Image (tube, helix red, strand yellow):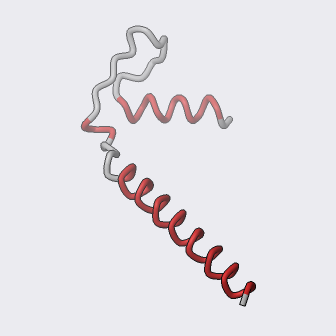
Amino acid sequence: MKKIKEFYKNYLTGFFIGLILFTIVGVSATAVFPSNQTTYNNGTTGMKATNVQTAIDEVYSTCFK
């Protein structure tokens, strides 16, 4: 009987933690904006890029050469 209670306790704990994480990830995913809808100013960065997508590509290529 003790093993059954332990199993259900662990099962419910995992279920609720998964539910909370799923809710957080689901909410975060709705806050993503396409790069063509975001403004970018390269005045203080020293980068050559003039739009968001080019800036992302430039940072990516610098980090992962």
Instruction: Name the outermost residue toward the right.
Output: 3
Residue 59 image position (x, y, % from top left): 54, 29
Q: Work out whether residue 46 or residue 21 is closer to the camera in this orientation and state it.
A: 21
The residue sitting at 46% across, 60% down in the picture is 20
Vertical placement of 50 versus 10: above or below?
A: above
Q: Work out whether residue 13 or residue 34 is closer to the camera in this orientation and state it.
A: 13
Is residue 64 found left or right of 39 in the rendered image? Answer: right
Where is the N terminus found, in terms of image quarters?
Answer: bottom right
Vertical placement of 17 versus 7: above or below?
A: above
Residue 8 image position (x, y, % from top left): 62, 81
Q: Work out whether residue 29 or residue 15 is closer to the camera in this orientation and state it.
A: 15
Vertical placement of 54 versus 19: above or below?
A: above
Instruction: Name the outermost residue toward the left.
Output: 37
Q: How many marks?
A: 0
The residue sitting at 25% across, 37% down in the picture is 37
Residue 46 image position (x, y, % from top left): 48, 11
Is residue 29 found left or right of 46 in the rendered image? Answer: left
The residue sitting at 28% across, 38% down in the picture is 36
Is residue 11 found left or right of 3 in the rendered image? Answer: left
Where is the C terminus found, in terms of image quarters?
Answer: top right
Vertical placement of 30 versus 47: above or below?
A: below
The residue sitting at 56% across, 74% down in the picture is 12
Quadrant in the rendering for residue 54: top left
Instruction: Name the outermost residue toward the bottom.
Output: 1
Residue 10 image position (x, y, % from top left): 65, 74
